[in-house]
């Protein structure tokens, strides 16, 4: 993928992740630390009970991070499949005797279309993630 196109996707994804972190994940982290501190303030609990309490506090954040990671991997896989399709089309064109400039042009247009399509998908991916994050019990 051309550097400019790759940077475009990377910037859009980073912006989405930063928004999710700032508005959702960070709040979950705060709740996790408060909950963990409360576990440590229970003097009658055994070490094992405190440890289990802390694990329960960490579970929602771990679930949220897993959810975001899975969705980003899915997004990356879709983008990769799209660009691989472009590579196949370019190879077919090259094998049919087309000049390198024509193949390069086709490749740039095709990859640009993949990038446009996937950057335009990010708002719906973001909405889906925000809904899923909101549904994680604290």
Image (cartoon, rainbow, N blue to C red):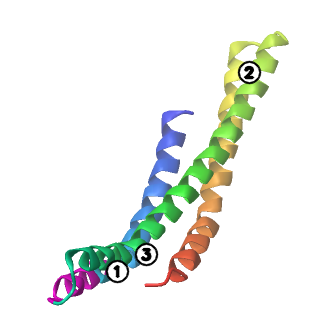
Q: Is 56 within the magenta?
A: no
Say how many tags the image has.
3
Crowding at mark 1 (Cα within 10 Å: few <14, some 14-19, many 20+): few
Q: Nearer the viewer, residue 112 or 21?
A: 21
Looking at the rendering, the stretch of residues picked out in magenta corresponds to 32-43
| Residue 102 numbered tag | 2
Front residue of 136 and 15: 136
Q: Is residue 24 above or below residue 96?
A: below
Above or below: residue 92 compared with residue 60: above
Q: Which residue is mark 1?
A: 27
The residues tagged by marks 2 and 1 sit, at their Cα atoms, a distance apart of 51 Å
Residue closer to the observer: 70 or 7 = 70
Residue at 75%, 19% in the rendered image: 91
Q: Residue at x 59, y 74 (%)?
A: 127
Name the quarter where the C terminus is drawn: bottom left
Q: Is residue 19 above or below residue 39?
A: above
Q: Do callouts 3 and 2 mark residues in contact (Cβ within 8 Å)?
A: no
Residue depth check, mark 1 versus mark 3: number of the one nearer the observer: 3
Residue 39 part of the magenta segment: yes
For the question of whether residue 19 can be seen, the reply is no
> What numbered label is drawn on residue 60?
3
Between disc 2 and disc 1, whose residue precedes? 1
Q: Is residue 31 left or right of residue 82?
A: left
Describe the element under mark 2 as helix, strand or loop.
helix
């Amino acid at each position: 993928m051309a550097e400019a196109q790759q940077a475009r996707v990377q910037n859009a994804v980073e912006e989405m992740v930063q928004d999710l972190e700032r508005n959702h994940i960070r709040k979950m982290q705060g709740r996790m630390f408060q909950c963990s501190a409360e576990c440590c303030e229970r003097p009658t609990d055994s070490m094992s009970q405190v440890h289990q309490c802390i694990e329960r506090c960490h579970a929602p954040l771990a679930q949220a991070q897993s959810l975001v990671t899975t969705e980003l991997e899915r997004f990356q896989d879709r983008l990769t499949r799209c660009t691989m399709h472009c590579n196949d089309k370019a190879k077919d064109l090259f094998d049919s005797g087309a000049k390198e400039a024509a193949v390069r042009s086709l490749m740039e247009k095709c990859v640009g279309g993949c990038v446009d399509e996937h950057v335009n998908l990010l708002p719906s991916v973001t909405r889906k993630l925000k809904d899923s994050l909101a549904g994680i019990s604290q």
